[in-house]
Amino acid sequence: MEAFIITLFIIGYIGIALEHPLKVNKTATALLTGVICWTLFAIFQHEKIDFISEELAHHLGQIGAILFFLMGAMTIVELVDAYQGFRIITDRIKTKNPKTLMWIVCWVTFILSAILDNLTTSIVMVSLLRKLVPNKQMRLFFAAMVVIAANAGGAWSPIGDVTTTMLWIGGQISAGNIIITLLLPSIVCMLIPLLYLQFTLKGELDYNSEENTADHHGHGHGHRPHPDKPIRGSKLIFFLGVGGLISVPVFKTFTHLPPYLGMLLALGILWVASELINPDMDEAEKRPYTAAGALTRIDVPSVLFFLGILLAVGSLESMGTLHHFAAWLDKTVGDQRIIITLIGILSSIVDNVPLVAASMGMYDMSIYPQDHLIWEYLAYCAGTGGSVLIIGSAAGVAVMGMEKIDFIWYMKRASLLALLGYFAGAIIYLIIQPYLAVHH
């Protein structure tokens, strides 16, 4: 039975990786894989149906915590975007020097992706690059650096990258500790490619070309507000939204309640504010500026993709497959640091969400407690390893779609830089980890 379900899981996994050639959305594949794995488990082990139901309920509790957290965060970000709150930051970037601009763009991306998340940040930053860098060839280098900076910025923040969020919600890492331990490695991971480009970037931003026509990102549905009219309440919504996101780890630290409650609290406050800002508008006019309108624009397929994938991984965990696999890896490879470094590189080929979910199932928290080297290093590797190939992270895929970046172009121009940054950050982490661990 086990071999059969594992084979099915691997086929589903390959289906997700080959989403574009197969022309089947990865969410559909993930949902089918998750449901069929559990169904077969229940059919083959019919006498254990009570155990299986308990396990399923247990996994659904964990998955629900992640999904509601993500939906809350996505809605908040969409609402800030509807009010054009991000222009508070982006309108302040005025430089005409490409190298200076590269530094500014990378740092803004790095910091924003730790607060919002790496996917949203890359979409906001690429929309901005279209206005700032009309020269298409140069813009591709900027876009590649946005991917690297967004993934590096997401890795050290409990709310920045979905994999770090999963480890935080699962209790494997604590918010304050992950910021302290991974901030420096993540900065190094971004700085190495950035410094290299400082010496090799040639050309001008080239403002007089006619390419400067593309505007705002269209990943949402429904009617978006007009971009040039200043919107009432945009500052308020921006500060409430960003403040709400940043306060989630604080909420968890004080109340010891799960993070999704903090996220839903922030969403509730923002929802009330968005309803009260424009009391004189009629319903239809007001809808794009309310949380209800923002909810129709969030990326629901992504949420269902996580559901399917985490269900599938959960079935392998409940069958004991992941524990056996971890034991086998320990026997053959031995050093966990090598295993996790490889997981990070693997995450540039396959999605990092199931890899992290599988690792969480492989290693027992009674042996590897909260903030153990394994968990911290996994957050770094899975977060930043995805930059090595453009399809390796959600940020990369979004930028690839928006800027029509060719897979091979990125591989030739950016993969080696991303890999150098990844290893440099990893080495820094492994050097500083023993010193930081002593202080805990």
Image (cartoon, rainbow, N blue to C red):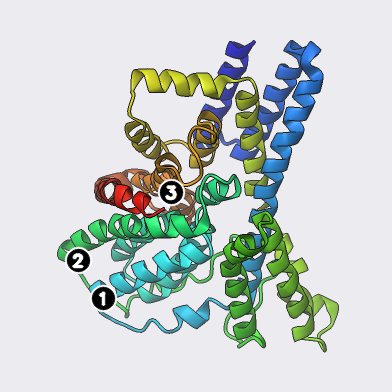
Secondary element at image label 1: helix
Does residue 25 appear anywhere in the picture?
Answer: no
Name the residue beneath numbered marker 2.
Answer: 198
Q: Is residue 203 left or right of residue 64?
A: left
Badge 2: residue crowd in 10 Å (few <14, some 14–19, many ≥20): some
Residue 128 in percent (x, y) is at 44, 72
Q: Earlier in the sequence, mark 2 or mark 1?
A: 1
Name the residue beneath numbered marker 3.
Answer: 383
Residue at image coords 63%, 60%: 252
Does residue 6 appear anywhere in the picture?
Answer: yes
Instruction: Give the answer, above or below, for where 274 lies relative to 111.
Output: below
Give the amino acid at mark 2: Gln
Residue 100 is labelled as 1
Give the amino acid at mark 3: Gly
Q: CA distance from mark 3 to mark 2?
A: 24 Å
Q: Earlier in the sequence, mark 3 or mark 1?
A: 1
Please identify, in this view, whether the residue under mark 3 or under mark 1 is nearer the observer. 3
